[in-house]
Amino acid sequence: MIFARKIKETFFKKSNTVRKHLTYPDVSMYEMVRRCANKYPDLTAYSYYGNKVSYKSYLRKIDTCACAFARLGVQKGDVVSIVMPNTPEAIISFYALNKIGAVINMIHPLSSEEELKYGMELTKTKYALVADIVYSKVKKIKDDLKLKRIIFSSVGESMDPVTKIGYKLKTLGKVDNSLTDDTVSYSRFYSRSKFFTGTIKDKGKGSDIAVMLHSGGTTGKPKCVVLTNKNFNAVALGLLETTQDMGPGVSTLSIMPIFHGFGLACTFHAVNITGGEAIILPTVSPKQFDETILKYKPNTIGCVPSLLEGLPNSKKLRDADLSFLKCIICGGDAISDKLCERLNDFLYDHGSEAKVRSAFGMTECTAGVTMVPKDKYKVGSIGYPIPDTDVKIIDPETHKECAPNEIGELCFSGPSVMVGYLNDEEETKNVLKKHKDGKTWMHSGDLGYKDEDGCIFYKARLKRMIVTSGYNVYPGQIEQIILEHPYVETCAVVGVPHPYKKEVVKAYIVLKEGLVLNSEIKKSIKEHCEKNIASYALPYAYGYRKELPKTKIGKVAYKELINDKDEESE
């Protein structure tokens, strides 16, 4: 096979051994960045719409920002919410607060008023750094929150003058710039650092609680995940050890959001502690992702599958030289084998040695558990555990460890596992359990298996598994088969309620560009399924959509599909 030949030619040029155990300094995240900045002062730490900032300048900005927060009254242990997209101000503030020893509560800027209120009340937020695009919502709830101070930061703060003008025109009338007495602009807040007369000594330890991220938890209720400095340092160091494609001067397209563990730990912190360049962008459109790649020419990319789907068909990339691309890390959602193979062939044909390397994690594990190493590529796998991390597959009912190739629940133990859920001891006990081996294991609620080599394969969410007429159906397997049909661009399979079968399989399908749905296409796809899928697992119904709904971070919104009854269906 051509694909197999390409794997052999490009992926196994050399063997790179990934160490199983690493040393983790007992320090803060800030200290890891400080050491890197002192080692590589003249290298570019980040760029924002073309504006490049060296590590020397980056560290100075962080230290100045820490003084500004200290003058505002922020102390060790205080909770400060950052409600920002990816901007220099957000990441500078993150490390500045970490230097002080404050706990940083990361909240999605597109959250509703109620979500913002809940996230800040739960964590007892005292101060908040808020983007201009979300300030109007925070303004409505600030009196209920009793915040000591709000810092207002424009997404255009660090843009070059021309881009900043464009941003202001684009957001004219869409953002509230009328600041109340308890709100200060970022530029004014930052300039007041000169009035701070004290000294800030970073005394952070690895075990110190540093960050709070928000997750659905195992019950679907909003959960606040409590994480330490070591959690983030361990994931970042583990990623660097496993990828072996990141390092001094290597640029990374840092587009995964900072309010998500994948973005914060893998596309920012891992870059910032190794001398790499973080290419910061607040938003990226899947339809313009090809333009983004050509404009910034990143060496590595961390992203979700939805951003990659359109690349093989991109007219802008048809004759492009992509040799600058060395590594693509795909996480946040499962990527189909078909898309992965198409992308790998596409990259090879355009001069890139990169392969789409799946990574797996969850917020409760600082978004990092497994990853495909450079020299152990297996299509469909999520790779091997990162250093010092153990993965166990167990029967969800009996907790007995599964044999190779037997599907069970994925459990994790290692330095990336969270402290627990904030103020929710019961839910914490549901997922963090001490086994007979004496280790504490994170029960993921995800299904998968290990092969004989210890390589891990993800199958589905335990709750996404469909039980129909007593049979277990794994949506990912059905999706893989449907994606093999030449008319199908992408699809999602869910279980919908049924009066006596409990659940039935429903497939939502997006056709390839240019195709118009008709009876012949429907018949062809249905016959393809009947030929390749067991009768008990066959889709009971097919829904056709122009696109699949996505969550705020780009995952397929399966819950929305389960409740959707308006699409064209059969």
Image (cartoon, rainbow, N blue to C red):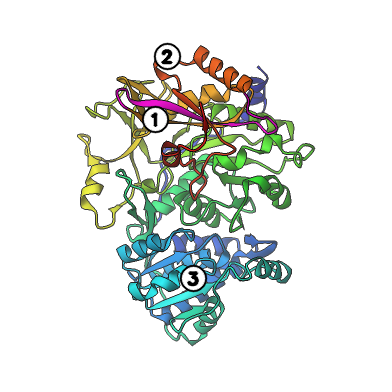
What residue is at 60 percent from the left and 58 percent from the top? 280
Q: Quadrant of residue 455?
A: top left
Q: Residues within 10 Å of mark 2 (few under 14, many from 20)?
A: few
Horizontal side of residue 398 vs 226, given as left or right: left
Residue furthest top in the image? 531
Along the line of sight, the residue nearer the viewer: 513 or 564: 564
Looking at the rendered structure, the kind of residue marked 2 is: Ser
Decide whether residue 508 is among the magenta residues.
yes
Figure check: 195 above or below 8: below
Figure check: 104 above or below 286: below
Q: Residues within 10 Å of mark 3 (few under 14, many from 20)?
A: some
* Distance in Å between CA atoms under marks 3 and 1: 39 Å
Horizontal side of residue 399 vs 229, given as left or right: left
Determine whether the residue tagged by mark 1 lies in a helix, strand or loop. Answer: strand
Determine whether the residue tagged by mark 2 lies in a helix, strand or loop. Answer: helix
Residue named by callout 2: 535
Residue named by callout 1: 495
Residue 437, horizontal then vertical, whole percent? 22, 35
Determine whether the residue tagged by mark 3 lies in a helix, strand or loop. Answer: helix
Horizontal side of residue 371 vs 344, given as left or right: left
* Distance in Å between CA atoms under marks 2 and 3: 53 Å
Q: Residues within 10 Å of mark 1 (few under 14, many from 20)?
A: many
Looking at the rendered structure, the kind of residue marked 3 is: Ser
Residue 497, horizontal then vertical, whole percent? 35, 31
* Of pointers 2 and 3, the one earlier in the residue sequence: 3
Boundaries of the magenta span:
499-518
Residue named by callout 3: 136
Task: Say if residue 12 shows up in the picture.
Answer: no
* Of pointers 3 and 1, the one earlier in the residue sequence: 3
